[in-house]
Structures are given as structure tokens and as C-alpha cells.
Image: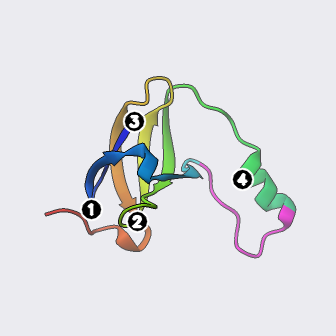
Amino acid sequence: MRITCPVCGERSAAEFSYGGDATIEMPALDASPEAWNAAVYDRENPRGAHAEFWQHAQGCRCWLKVERDTLTHKISSVALVGKAAGKGRS
């Protein structure tokens, strides 16, 4: 699988670290351990189109929101998130 980082360009998925499901709302930082456990571990295993967070850990270290088909691994979109949003290749 290859992911096109908006900052670095197309790279092997081996350079990225999976960051979790981008479709759920994470609890507040001061939430209970039970709320955090539910947000991190109690989730569906979707089949088909899905939004995920990935970090370009061996590159620019930016966080990305990746729209990916979990059956085919085809990536339909990649966008920067967090402080890096609005940056990218010109």
C-alpha cells in the first residue's frame, strides 16, 4: 500500500503509523479511563470505505486523515490534520 503525503509525496505505508479511527469522537483529556478504553478499543471493524488517522512517522511526522477502502486498500483521499493543515506541496 502506498500513501501520498501532502508534504512529502507518495511513500510506502511502512513509513506511516496507524493512528486510529477518524470517524469517532475522542473523549476529553480528563475523561475517565473507562471512556478512553471504550474510545480506543471498543470499535467496529468496518468493511469498505473508512476514514483513518495515520502519522508519517518516518517522514515529516505530520498527521493525516486517510479515506481508504479496507477491502481493496485503495485510498481515495489524504488530508493534513492538526497544526499542519493548510500546508502541503505547492
Name the residue tied to disc 1.
Answer: 7
First in sequence, mark 4 or 1: give its number.
1
Please tell me whether mark 1 or mark 3 is closer to you in this view: 3
Amino acid tagged 1: Val
Q: Position of residue 32 (x, y in %)?
A: 84, 68
Q: Position of residue 42 (x, y in %)?
A: 77, 44
Name the residue tied to disc 2.
Answer: 62
Identify the residue at horizontal 84%, vertical 65% (top origin): 33
Give the left or right position of residue 61, taking residue 10 as reference.
Answer: right
Contact (CB < 8 A) between labels 4 and 1?
no
Identify the residue at horizontal 37%, vertical 62% (top origin): 59
Contact (CB < 8 A) between labels 1 and 2?
yes
Separation of residues labelled 1 and 2 (CA atoms): 8 Å
Name the residue tied to disc 3.
Answer: 1
How many neighbours does mark 3 have within 10 angstroms: few (below 14), some (14-19), or many (20 or more)? few
Amino acid tagged 4: Val
Amino acid tagged 3: Met
In the rendered image, the vertical position of residue 73 relative to residue 28, given as above or below: above
Name the residue tied to disc 4.
Answer: 40
First in sequence, mark 3 or 2: give its number.
3
Separation of residues labelled 1 and 3 (CA atoms): 18 Å
Q: Point out the image quarter for the N terminus.
A: top left
